[in-house]
Structures are given as C-alpha cells and as structure tokens.
Image (cartoon, coloured by chain):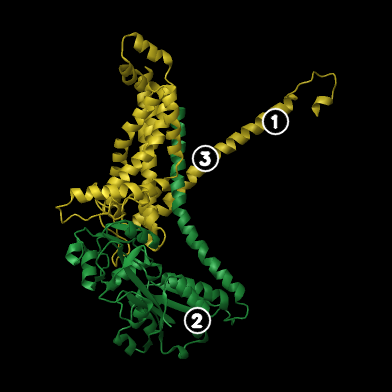
C-alpha cells in the first residue's frame, strides 16, 4: 500500500525500508520459535525422565537397582536388579554394530566409489526402502524367519546339553541379527553422503601418485569422510539401543545373562512388556529403566561427539 | 559438523519416539476404563441413587482389574463411592474380620478358621487358566506335578513326559500379569518359574506356542482356539463346567468376603452384590476374562 502513497518516490517491489525490516523481524521470530520447539522437547523429556525415574532409584537403592541380578518385581519381597538387562542392551548393541557396520560401510563404499550408476540405481532404492520399513515389520519377519532358523541352530548346537534351556529361537542372537539389519540403512545413507562429499581432487591426486583404486578408497576417501561415517555409526548405535518393537518379538524377554542362546531382555523391552499392568514401585522402576536408557544414549552421544571433535581438529592441522 | 548436529537431533527424536511408544500403552489402559463407565451412566437413569454412600474394600491384588472395572461402573450408575485397596488376600480377610472394611477381597477360598470368625465367603467370579501346547505335540495330559516340574525347569524334554524327543520351550507372561499371578499362585511357583520366553499378551502366548515346536504356555480359558492344543490337567479338560465343579485345578475363586451374610450388610453393599449378579455385572466379569460364578 505504501507503494501508491507517493508517486514521486522510486517504486520498489520489496516495499519500504519499514515493511522490509518488519518481514525480517517476523521471519526471525518464526525461526527462533521453531528452534525452541526442539529445545523445549529435549528439556521436557529430560526433566520428566528425572522426575519420574529418580525417586525409585533412592527407594530401592541405586546399587540394588543398577547392580542387582534378580528381577522379581511382583514377588513377596520384590527385587529390582537390572544388571543383566543393562548388560544385554550393551552387548546386544555392540554385537549388532560389529555385524552391521562393516556391511553398511562396504555398501556405502560400493555405492559411492565402486558401482557404476546403473547398479547403484538398483541398490540405492533398496537401501532407502529398508530405511522406510517400520520396525514392527522387522520384528514380525524376525519371528517368522530368524526365530525358526536360530531354533534349528540351537537344537543342533545344544543337542547333548541337557542343562540348556531351549528358547525356541527367541534369544540374544536373533535380536542381534534383527538389529544389525535395522541399522544398515541409517549407516549406509549417512556414510555414502559423506563419502560423496569428499572432493574429487583427493581421489585424483591419490590415483596420480600411483595408488590403486582400493588403496585410494581406504587410505584417502574413507579417512577424509571419517566424521560423517562416525555420525552414521552413532546414529546406528542410537537406533539399536533404543529399538523396542522389533526385538520384543524375537528376544524371548526373560531376564538372563546375555549369552547368544539365552532368552534375554533389553532396557527397551523391559519397559514395553511390563508397563501395561505394572503398578506402584514396579511402575516407578520401569521409569528408572527409561532414565538409565536415556542416560546411556546421552553419554554415548557426548563421548562420541567429543572424540569426533578431537579427531576433526587433528585432521584440520 | 552439520551432520553431527543432525545426528544429535535425530537421536533425540528416536529416543522421544521410544518414550512415546512406552507411554502410549498406558494411555490406552486409562482411556478404555472411563469409556465403559460413561456408557453405564447413560443407561443408568432409573438406578437407585445411593447419594455417595461409601463402600470400602481391600484385599487381593489379582482382583485389581476386576475391582477397578466394577467400582467404576457401579459408582457411575449408583452415585456411590466404592473404593478398593489392593493389599493381598490375607490382609483383606483380616481387615473384613476386624470390621475395618466392608468387603475383603480374596483370590482363594476361605479357610475353615476364617469362616469360623463369622466371615461369609461370597464367590463372585472364577478365574480359569488353560495350558496349551503346539499342534504337533502328542502329549495330551499333564499332571499338576509334571506342570510344576516343567515350569521349574526340572523336566526339559517332552520324551520324559511320554512325548517325542523334543526340547520343551517354556513360555509365560510378564510379571504383573494377572494370568501369570494366578498360574504361579495355584501351582505354588511364585517367582520360581524358569521362563524361556516372557510374552506381554495372551494373544502373543497363543501365537508363540502355535509357531514354536515343543512350546508350552498358559492362557485365559476364553481365548483357546484350534491353532494350539489345550492339554488336560490331571485328566480333566479345561472348560467352564469342570471349573465350576472344581475338578479342574487351574482355577481359583474370586471371593468378596463380608462379615456376616450379605443380607446383614448396608444398603450400599447389598446394592453392589445385586449389581454383580445383574446382567451388567456379569458383562464386566466376562470382559475382564473371568467366568461367572452363578
């Protein structure tokens, strides 16, 4: 409207200085508000988890919860030890990463460095599709395919071991396999993106110096893309540690030491499977398990970010 | 650097989703109960108005699901204030004997001694559990002792029970489940069971037993179908008739004990028992997976 107020003024399509700065300020506010949604969410979750998870820690005793090995929440004399549950989460996630990450990294290298575009165009959509599959579907496939196969293996291995408790294939190994497949797309996508971001000159220089293609990949390209690859692995750890729906079907869910053929319970499945009917202190301890999980993910995130920062600084010199 | 920030953000997102999933289940529980309460209010225009009369109950934790559904519907329809505490069967009977509560809830039959103290055993419902095995299992009957041995992990192969040479996969429910509580209580296996799999729903147990060779599990009687075999216990088939007659051992009465007969109780307590015996009360009993005691 200000455009027509004075015909002598030069006409601007953006508007006067005043309206222009108003738009700038409004846009700024919108950005800040949007950014705060995330901060508020993180704060709310943190406060809520501590508020609802911490009381039980002191009622039961921190050591009794974190280092107790007996989980009998509904017994006459209940005990809430989650040591085996914590160990299962750590070992299950570690094994899933050990199996999943090499496969994912090789796939990422294949997609960005080795494959011709025709082949890459077949593999890439497949990986993207894998990322879009809901976790509960992984769980169902685990029940239908992995559990029976693992049960056959279990029967073969423990044929002459009368003391072994047969799990029907629902054990740590099945859970690890499902998790390893689940983290593939996360690690592949991020690693591939960071491999592609490595400047072409790096590769050309390496090749010009006489290095072979494989030497170039492992000595130049992958180290240069290191920070992105580590981010992918961190995300993979987060996904494996935090996954519940997929593994609640396949892990057996009894509280045991995390041996491959034991029925096990992870931090996430402990919450999911007992929240329905739990009451009183039992319920509060389930929130404490949530708090432990939360703390784990925070610690992993902070530690790996720090390592990353240090590594990055060294790299820049 | 940018990637890392996205990473942190995505981690938070993944985490909060996990939390939401955990909370969702609870919300469902909360929502379903008021829904049934309100439908009763709508239909209860001509019900007696008890003007907020109080009824206090205490006792069995296993009866929590039944009692909370019952008090909710009853309070809405009769404008009463029935409340229940879950302290355990023994404590409930003690409380009603001492006269500190109107009704003592017990998920076991009363002993002669308890009855001698003037407490009336009013059985309101029966909880029945069936033992199921996979379709190909040839074992059709188990004794109580065999069941105990299986769930304690003392017998681990079906060949020791007259079946084929196949490992037993012991499947049960998660702690906190009423079915698990009842099963372990009746067989005196409280927290002595060695489960190979703990499943968090009745349907889950059925599916696992149906798909795992050599599996055994326990479920509420009302969900049995032809995907699994229900075994007889001590030679008695699990059905309503056998449970009511008391021949089938995997069942227990839900008792709402009163000091003296029901007719000697206050108007509000009598109204509550009338309500349990009405069609609406029986509907609640069926809805929480129990068998009518009528």
Q: Residue at x 22, y 65 (%)?
A: B150
Q: Which of labels 3 and 2 is toward the front?
A: 2
Q: Chain of mark 2?
A: B
Chain under disc 1: A
Q: Earlier in the sequence, mark 1 or mark 3?
A: 1
Q: Is residue B262 visible?
A: yes
Q: Choose between B57 and A265: the one closer to the eye.
A: A265
Of marks 1 and 3, the one in the foreground? 3
| Number of residues whose C-alpha sits closer than 10 Å to that of mark 1, classed few (under 14), some (14–19) or many (20 or more) | few
Choose between A47 and B157: the one closer to the eye.
Answer: B157
- Residue B100 x, y percent position in the rendering: 41, 81
Q: Which residue is mark 3?
A: A38
The picture quadrant where one finds residue A106 is top left
Reading the image, the residue beneath label 1 is A22
Closer-to-camera residue (A157/A65): A157
Image-based side of A163 in relation to A300, left or right: left
> Colour in which chain B is shown?
green
> B293 left or right of A18?
left
* A177 vs B3: above or below: below
Residue at position x 28%, y 40% in the image? A95
> Can you identify the residue that label 2 sits on?
B272
- SS type, badge 1: helix
Question: Badge 2: few (under 14), some or many (20 or more) residues near its Cα, within 10 Å?
Answer: many
Q: Compared to B264, does B231 lie above or below?
A: above
Please name whichever residue, A211 or A41, is drawn nearer the observer in this view of the structure: A211
Image spot of residue A152 (x, y percent): 24, 49
């Amino acid at each position: 409207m200000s455009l027509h107020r004075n015909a002598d003024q030069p006409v601007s399509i953006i508007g006067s200085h005043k309206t222009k700065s108003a738009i700038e300020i409004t846009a700024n506010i919108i950005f800040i508000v949007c950014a705060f949604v995330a901060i508020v969410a993180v704060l709310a979750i943190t406060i809520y988890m501590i508020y609802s998870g911490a009381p039980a820690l002191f009622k039961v005793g921190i050591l009794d919860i974190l280092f107790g090995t007996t989980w009998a929440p509904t017994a006459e004399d209940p005990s809430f030890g989650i040591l085996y549950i914590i160990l299962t989460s750590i070992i299950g996630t570690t094994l899933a990463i050990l199996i999943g990450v090499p496969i994912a990294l090789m796939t990422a290298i294949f997609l960005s460095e080795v494959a011709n575009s025709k082949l890459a165009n077949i593999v890439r959509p497949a990986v993207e599709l894998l990322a879009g599959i809901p976790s509960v579907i992984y769980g169902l496939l685990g029940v239908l395919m992995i559990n029976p196969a693992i049960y056959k293996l279990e029967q073969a291995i423990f044929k002459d071991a009368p003391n072994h408790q047969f799990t029907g294939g629902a054990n740590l190994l099945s859970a690890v396999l499902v998790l390893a497949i689940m983290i593939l797309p996360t690690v592949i996508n991020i690693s591939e993106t960071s491999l592609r971001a490595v400047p072409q000159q790096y590769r050309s220089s390496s090749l010009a110096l006489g290095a072979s293609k494989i030497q170039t990949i492992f000595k130049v390209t992958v180290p240069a893309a290191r920070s992105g690859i580590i981010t992918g692995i961190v995300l993979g750890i987060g996904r494996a540690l935090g996954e519940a729906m997929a593994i609640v079907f396949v892990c057996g869910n009894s509280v045991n030491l995390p041996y491959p053929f034991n029925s096990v319970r992870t931090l996430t499945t402990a919450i999911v499977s007992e929240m329905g009917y739990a009451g009183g202190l039992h319920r509060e301890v389930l929130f404490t398990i949530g708090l432990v999980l939360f703390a784990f993910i925070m610690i992993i995130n902070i530690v790996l970010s720090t390592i990353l920062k240090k590594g990055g600084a060294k790299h820049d010199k | 650097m940018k990637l890392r920030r996205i990473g942190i953000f995505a981690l938070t997102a993944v985490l909060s989703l996990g939390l939401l999933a955990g909370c969702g289940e609870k919300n469902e529980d909360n929502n379903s109960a008021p829904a049934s309460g309100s439908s009763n209010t709508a239909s209860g225009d001509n019900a007696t108005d008890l003007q907020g009369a109080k009824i206090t109950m205490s006792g069995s934790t296993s009866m929590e699901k039944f009692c909370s559904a019952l008090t909710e519907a009853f309070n809405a329809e009769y404008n009463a204030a029935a409340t229940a505490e879950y302290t355990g069967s023994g404590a409930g009977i003690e409380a009603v004997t001492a006269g500190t509560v109107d009704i003592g809830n017990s998920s076991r039959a009363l002993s002669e001694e308890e009855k001698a103290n003037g407490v009336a055993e009013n059985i309101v419902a029966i909880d029945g559990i069936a033992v199921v095995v996979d379709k190909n299992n040839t074992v059709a009957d188990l004794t109580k002792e065999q069941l105990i041995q299986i769930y304690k992990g003392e017998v681990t192969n079906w060949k020791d029970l007259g079946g084929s040479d196949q490992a037993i996969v012991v499947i049960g429910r998660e702690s906190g489940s009423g079915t698990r509580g009842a099963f372990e209580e009746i067989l005196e296996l409280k927290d002595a069971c060695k489960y190979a799999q703990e499943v968090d729903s009745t349907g889950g147990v059925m599916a696992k037993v149906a798909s795992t060779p050599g599996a055994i599990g326990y479920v509420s009687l009302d969900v049995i179908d032809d995907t699994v075999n229900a075994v007889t216990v001590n030679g008695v088939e699990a059905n309503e008739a056998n449970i009511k007659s008391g021949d089938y051992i995997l069942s227990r009465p839900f008792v709402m004990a009163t000091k003296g007969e029901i007719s000697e109780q206050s108007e509000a307590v009598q109204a509550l028992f009338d309500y349990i015996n009405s069609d609406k009360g029986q509907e609640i009993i069926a809805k929480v997976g129990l068998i009518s005691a009528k």
